[in-house]
Amino acid sequence: MAEAETPVAPSAPTSLAPVRVYRHRLPTRVWHWVNAVTLLILLMSGLTIFNAHPRLYWGEYGANFDRAWLVIGSTPDSGYLRVGDWRVDTTGVLGRWTNAEGVEKTWAFPGWATIPTSYSLADGRRWHLFFAWVMAIGLTLYMLWTAVAEHLRKDLHVRRGEWSPRHIWHDVKDHARLRFPTGEAAARYGILQKLSYIGVIFILLPLMIATGLTMSPGLNASAPWLLDLFGGRQSARSIHFIAAWALIAFFVVHIVMVLLAGLLNEVRSMVTGWFRLPPEKDA
């Protein structure tokens, strides 16, 4: 998740050379790439765990004969996704699909999307729990760094004028029309970027960790208040699933924006820290 920090030490502009700013400090770059790999592995191993029981419920309990709000299942000749009373055929993608060897499978998610690619609940849990610790420790250290280095105050803090409906709507229209900021404005966050990163760092990722802990029988014994907080283990599992797909949606939008804004410049800035400012447009 790329983050634009307060630029420092811009190189002197000339008529030929573009202006460069030091956009991403080392802790941000390290956390970005570690987090990218970690979240991918957590998603794929999480899908393996979901395949063990591809049904979601609200409340404390849930089993095959209980009413699930989401089901990915199969019939003798098709696969389907059901959300509430809405049902759609997903044969060949979810529920019933054919692997590379031509063997028909009835797992909820196909093997190419899971870790391991062959179904193993025990191995999926090992991968998931190990990288959950990587994410939790990395997120904690990054949060502390954002406070100590004043990254939160300088770069993510939403200022009073930015809460204006007119300001927010202007940013929405610019994004919809693919109008990206130029010049010095390109080194700063817009309101939508700020809200997105704040939502991911301080809401979605902590929510994933908290709901994951709520599904642990050991934590249920030592911290039963987590069950009360999320309304039961099955509710925590449902919230965990929804938050995971919210992160996927953020990731997809983030990648699209990077591609449209300039892949080379964006990736280079997240590797080296240096970002070339797009030239100001003529009035």
Image (cartoon, rainbow, N blue to C red):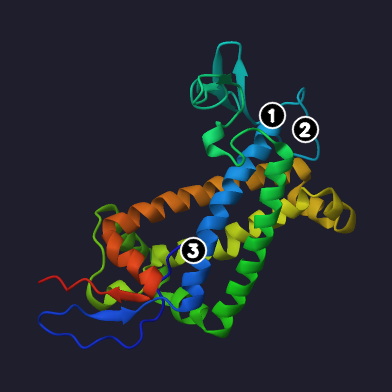
Image coords of residue 234 (percent x, y): 75, 40
Three-letter amino acid code at disc 1? Ala
List the residue tagged with mark 1: 68
Three-letter amino acid code at disc 3? Trp
- Mark 2: give few (<14), some (14-19) or many (20+) Cα within 10 Å: some
Labels 3 and 2: the sequence-earlier one? 3
The answer to whether residue 158 is above or below residue 201 is: below
Q: Secondary structure at mark 2?
A: loop
Labels 2 and 1: the sequence-earlier one? 2
CB-based contact (under 8 Å), mark 3 and mark 2: no
- Mark 3: give few (<14), some (14-19) or many (20+) Cα within 10 Å: some
**Between marks 3 and 1 in the image, the one whose residue lies nearer the viewer:** 3
Labels 3 and 1: the sequence-earlier one? 3
Between the C-alphas of marks 2 and 1, the distance is: 8 Å
Q: Secondary structure at mark 3?
A: helix
Q: Nearer the viewer, residue 187 or 169?
A: 187
Q: Residue at x 57, y 24 (%)?
A: 95
List the residue tagged with mark 3: 33
Q: Nearer the viewer, residue 11 or 191?
A: 11
List the residue tagged with mark 2: 62
Q: With 246 as the anchor, is 211 left or right in this view?
A: right
Between the C-alphas of marks 3 and 2, the distance is: 37 Å
CB-based contact (under 8 Å), mark 2 and mark 1: yes
Image coords of residue 24 (percent x, y): 41, 76
Image coords of residue 31 (percent x, y): 53, 68
The answer to whether residue 69 is above or below residue 44 is: above
Q: With 37 as the anchor, is 236 left or right in this view?
A: right
Q: Secondary structure at mark 1?
A: loop
Task: Specify the quadrant that holds the C terminus.
Answer: bottom left
Three-letter amino acid code at disc 2? Gly
Q: With 93 as the anchor, is 204 left or right in this view?
A: right
